[in-house]
Image (cartoon, rainbow, N blue to C red):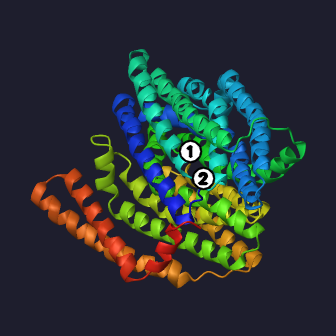
Amino acid sequence: MNKQSLIKGSIILGIAGILTRFLGLFFRWPLIMLIGDEGIGYYQMSYPLYMFFIAMASGVPVAISKMISEKNATNDISGSFEVMKESAILMAIIGTGTTLVLFFFARPIITFLKWDPKAYYSLIGISFAPIVISFVTIFRGFFQGLQNMTPSAISQILEQVGRVIFGVGLAVFLLPRGIEYSAGGAAFGATAGAVMGGSYLYASYKKIRKSYKVKKIKSNPEILSTILRIAIPISLGTTVSSIMNLIDSILVPQKLLQAGFTNTQATVLYAQLTGKASVIINIPLTLSIAICTSLIPIIAENFILKKQRELKNKIDASMKMAAVIAIPCTFGLFFLAGPVMKLIFPGKFEGIEILKYLSLTIPFIIITQTTTAILQGTGNYIKPIVNLLIGCVIKVILTWTLVSMEAFNIYGAVIASFSAYVVVSILNIITLKFTLKIGLNLYEILIKPAYASTIMMLFVLFSYNIIYKNTISNGLSCLTSILLGIIVYITLIIVFKVFDMEEIKSRLKRR
């Protein structure tokens, strides 16, 4: 199987991620129209808890990706399939256990976390997903280890299609029984989508296995030990990261009550933060995740083969790509928060200011993700976890303190997230410098993209205002100005030589 370069793999996953997020709007938008901010609040309360359980197993696919990349580097084909067998056993246990816990302990969990009892149906609806997702992630890890991102990309699209069809369909079907039932039906869409994506991945895996003429795969307890050694610290790091979202689902509604809001008002504000603003913020983060997913196996291979120069080139390219994504997205969502929110959620666009200020976290989240991936790819698992723990402590303290103050209320959670990720990104950069002895050219990585983003944003604002005055259409003005902004930005990236054209051509070719 042909390997894909960092840029090519990132582009494939990035395009799939953007399509997935776009399809996600066809899931989110009808839900908001059907059940409003209150219903979305019930749905969003269950989601971070589900993601927390998933995060506990997230190190396994990363470990698979890293180990298979290393085994392919040494031409150990049978070892790659042994990794798959051992990881399947492990993930079957984790996935089944997670599903059982969420299903049978839903009411005690809701009582303990002091959530609205109506969130029960969403938690039940989403409880079936972990057992299916567990196997989906294994196959994605396998193909990513082969440095072929196409199957993962296609499966993501299929998964979202299934989620939209079944999730929205069930939400409509159950709406007459109440918005809490409708939210539960929407939550079940995650399971249906995972089945669709997983079916495609399994068929693709069978073809690869047949092409390598692998029939019987022997057990190898040593591989299981290696998987656990790599996966546990990565899972801990991802779990700490997901705890930041879980903190919001636990603390924000409670502290809003202390700030003087009613139960319904607290649920609505929480929905505006996590069900609207965060959903839009996650769109550029999809591109960052694509970079990180492509990066780990490539970094791991260069690291184990001691290709120091190539390793530095990959790190430089990944950090530059992260900045090129993060800075213009931050500018765009900060200055066009209103038009974007009105475009995506027409008639239900409350939460514009939340989106505006939450957008400032984008660069620091992307830097955190990218530097964590680099450190994990070079075998440094514990250090980024420690940094994330520090950020998590900062978030808890600030959320606990600020959200309960009426003057800050929901914006206290935004300030807490921003502060946490600023600290983590700085700590990760310092760790990267002293661990790998690699310096970063901040002018090339940050300043040039910032120049291009500033000029692009001025052009976008000017074009938006001109088009809006002539059409009085927010949708047309927003989409057209953004499209023109993308063209201007790409042109400026080339003019400022953020990426050298020869560098791009060489990296798009097979490694």
- The secondary structure type at the circle numbered 2 is helix
| Residue on which disc 2 sits | 399
Q: Can residue 52 be seen in the rendering of this structure? A: no
Give the image location of residue 371, x and y in percent. Answer: 64, 66
| Residue on which disc 1 sits | 252
Residue 375 in which image quadrant: bottom right
Give the image location of residue 101, x and y in percent. Answer: 72, 27
Residue 98 drawn above or below residue 22: above
Q: Residue at x 87, y 42 (%)?
A: 220
Residue 104 drawn above or below residue 18: above
Of residues 148 and 25, which is closer to you in this image? 148
Asked if labels 1 and 2 touch by Cβ distance under 8 angstroms, the answer is yes
Residues at marks 2 and 1, CA–CA distance in whole angstroms: 7 Å
- The secondary structure type at the circle numbered 1 is helix
User: What amino acid is found at the position of numbered circle 1 in the picture?
Assistant: Val
Crowding at label 2, few (<14), some or many (≥20) Cα neighbours within 10 Å? many
User: What amino acid is found at the position of numbered circle 2 in the picture?
Assistant: Thr
In the image, farthest residue toward the right: 222
Of residues 393 and 380, which is closer to you in this image? 380
Give the image location of residue 196, x and y in percent. Answer: 52, 31
Give the image location of residue 230, x and y in percent. Answer: 79, 53
The quarter of the picture where the C terminus appears is bottom right
In the figure, is residue 90 to the left or right of 357? right
Of residues 343 and 257, which is closer to you in this image? 343
